[in-house]
Image (cartoon, coloured by chain):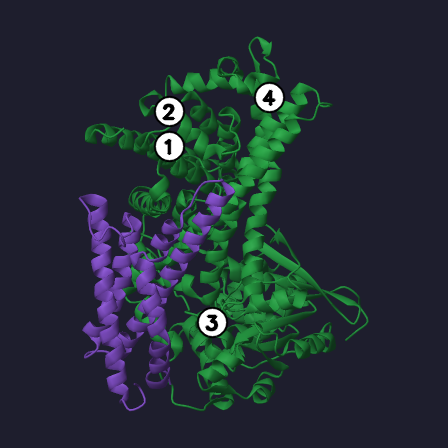
Chain colours: A green, B purple
Amino acid sequence: MSKKEGYIVALAGVPNSGKSSIFNKLTGGRAWVGNWPGVTIEKKIGTMRINSIEIEVVDLPGIYGLTAYSLDEIIARNFIVEENPDLVIVVVNATNLERSLYLALSILELEANTIVALNMVDLAEEQGIVIDHEKLSELLGIPVIPTVAVTGSGLKKLRELILEYVGRSKGRTNIVDYGYDLERAIRDVEKILQENVPEIIRKYPSRWISIKLLEWDEDVIRKVKSYAGGNEVIRKVEKIRAELQNKIDDLELFMTERRYQTILNIVKEVIKQTKAKGVTWTDLLDSILTHRFLGIFSAIAVLYMLFRFAFEISTPFVDLFSILINGYLHNRILGLKFLPSWLASLLADGVTNGVGTVVSFLPLIMMFFLGLAFLEDVGYMTRIAYLVDKLFSKFGLSGKTVIPLVIGFGCNVPAVMATRTIEDENERKTAALIAPLATCSARLPVYMVIAYAVFRQVAGAVVLSMYIWSVALALLVALALRKLVFKGPSAGFVMEMPPYIMPRSDIIGMKMWERSKRFLYKAGSVILIGVIFIWLLSVTGPSGFLGANALSSPRLLEHSWTGLLGKAFSETIFRPLNWDWRISVALIFGFIAKEIVVGTMAILYGIGESGLPAALAKLHAFTPVTGYAFMIFVLIYVPCIATIATIRSEMGSKYAVMAVAYELILAYTLALAVISFGHLLGVM
Amino acid sequence: MSGKLHASERLEIISVISGFFGSAYMILGLCALVARTSGECLTRITPGNIGMSILLLSIGAVLLSSPTTFRKNIILSSAASLVGSLLSITAMVVQVLDVGATWLDDIIRSQSFGRGDIVAGLLRGDAFLGYFMLLVFPFVLKTVKEHIIR
């Protein structure tokens, strides 16, 4: 190790290799999140300290190779070649060495200073796979250390290796032999680069650039063309490619095959199968959980239980929060005699009732994310993506769209961003436009309030029906978009099934907290501003300040700005939907963020200790039909300003307007359909 | 019971047990559907909503596939017993937690929650069948581990 301070270590690995677990173990779970330059894909950075030396650890996106077909792969390779990390740790999945080694070889071709963490060796051994890591190290020419990230085994040695190798100079590693003709062509291209664009050789490894040019990698071609003399290089490479293609039909395929041949040779030398490959627990469970019929039945059962767990078990905690915040705290603030009445009203009726009602749903959100993190950690969510792939293909999408949709159940903003991993442009745009239909955690409190106010006994099933509507509508809208706007075949996708593992409470807890934290943060920022604004509009009107008690006086409230606004909507656009003016106001302010819907209702209905659902039930604010129509409307109409802004930054203003327009029309039409259907059945 | 039995006999026993419980889940699931739509059906033990009906029918379908696939695909049959019993036990745990949560909620809201309600909740069909599956599960797990997993 040299004496430089402030090292950067990049962590690379295929999906499901345990890369995130290693990242968390190395950094102690302390990470901050930013964006990769020029794109809105999340970049996770943490720090570790070894012998008082601080090292920044950058978690690269989970990738299978370093091609130019996926944005994640371009990001990873650009980081390695342009940011020049002092060390790259490649996390290799020991249960699927072939797949992981492809990435390792691609990184070695970049001539990065690399070490390998051979992870999940315990699972591999369970499957009778014993890997000679010393031999592997010898064949790759870099250190290889066996690890089990979830238990922390091997991580002490990994830290020692990081300390020993970080900042070492790079070495040229020609592990893959591309054969006589191609190797000669690579040397020729290197020479052309040296003669025409020597600057690029100083920045990027010449052999790697040459290989990529011969593979006709568009990103590298762009890079070369950006230099003076670059066009000349490309012309010469084209000529070399044409000559080569007289001998080799498909150059890119040939090069991929040579890499896999090298990998097979390595694997043959380092893997010892100690027992005949038989049925593993993963095979056994997958025979049911990925079965075309039984897999669906199992998924229905698992997801329904997840909802029961989250919604029904969280009830006492939600009620306790509600009593403490909306009852005790609210009354205490109102009882503070030294506060002027307007300030007491702002703090009690505005902030406490508004933000407090949203925060009281934190136990529910946490339990939902706890269950979701558990399913992710054991490896079950991947099976759900696999199960729906066939179904999704009928709607012009691939199973890859499931990932943004699942993320969307947490928050629509990262869901729209997650569509960047979809290679096919038409599919990506479709996925980004349907992502807001994934019912995010902000909508959950709204469903819960209505479900408990109107459908108490079957609240869980009613809320679950929103999720079914969410997926069904996303698919139908996708079908319409693929048929009418983004035409073209679905690209399909390849997904690796990770083995099932015993979930780790620390990892699940961390995932749950990371996601719940966003909900809390939003409550303390945008929701707080929103409810203060609503309070202000509720205690003032055309005649000026109505008094701090306007919120407890229906007559005064009706003459406030919110009352007038709500009435204008409820007597015109929302008239056929039969909603109270206060509900209209809640929906209008819900444009800012969906959590504000509950906060606004809490302010305008002036709730007490029993909480909003009880207050709504007592006032008969909703019938089962109008309540369900309201839930449908909230599910579909504009998710929040942040999501719209993300769609705009990802796809442009045209598509942001398109998203808002279709969601409003669809929300209104379906809510009206529910009301009309209720009328037809004589149920109101 | 199990020591003197052959592997195939032990696997057959778990598939028969799964079939028995699968049928019970199907009956309970159909009853939940009937109770919700048109009338009463095993009122004391049947959960009365569509969601629970779908859950019970789904668990029943998985468990019933064990005896029906036993002759054709012993791995699938064993997996059905294992997954079915896991789903059944999870459903029972969720129901028990739900009873506890409702009890706690009523204390918080100062409402009465009689001992009868707790007993009724704990003896509801989905919980009741889950207790039996919990008893059977170690035998299912041991049999599958010894005779299927390699």
For marks 3 and 2, the one nearer the N-term is: 3
> Regarding mark 3 in the picture, which secondary structure is present there?
loop
For marks 1 and 2, the one nearer the N-term is: 2
Mark 4 crowdedness (10 Å alpha carbons): few <14, some 14-19, many ≥20: some
**Which numbered dot is residue A579?**
2
> Regarding mark 4 in the picture, which secondary structure is present there?
helix
Mark 3 crowdedness (10 Å alpha carbons): few <14, some 14-19, many ≥20: some
Question: In the image as oriented, which residue stretches furthest toward the front?
Answer: B115
Distance Cα–Cα, label 4 vs label 3:
52 Å
Mark 2 and mark 4 in contact? Answer it, CB < 8 Å.
no
Q: Nearer the viewer, residue A122 or A645?
A: A122
Instruction: Look at label 4 and name its amino acid.
Output: Leu
Report the chain holding disc 1.
A
Q: Pointer 3: what residue?
A: A501
For marks 2 and 4, the one nearer the N-term is: 4
> Regarding mark 1 in the picture, which secondary structure is present there?
helix
For marks 3 and 1, the one nearer the N-term is: 3
| Residue A556 shown left or right of residue A23 in the figure | left
Distance Cα–Cα, label 3 vs label 1:
41 Å
Report the chain holding disc 3.
A
Instruction: Look at label 1 and name its amino acid.
Output: Phe
> Which quadrant, please, contains the C terminus of chain A?
top left
Q: Nearer the viewer, residue A68 or A464?
A: A464
Q: Pointer 4: what residue?
A: A536
Report the chain holding disc 4.
A
For marks 4 and 3, the one nearer the N-term is: 3
Query: In this orientation, does residue A16 appear?
Result: yes
Q: Nearer the viewer, residue A557 or B142?
A: B142
Report the chain holding disc 2.
A
**Which numbered dot is residue A630?**
1
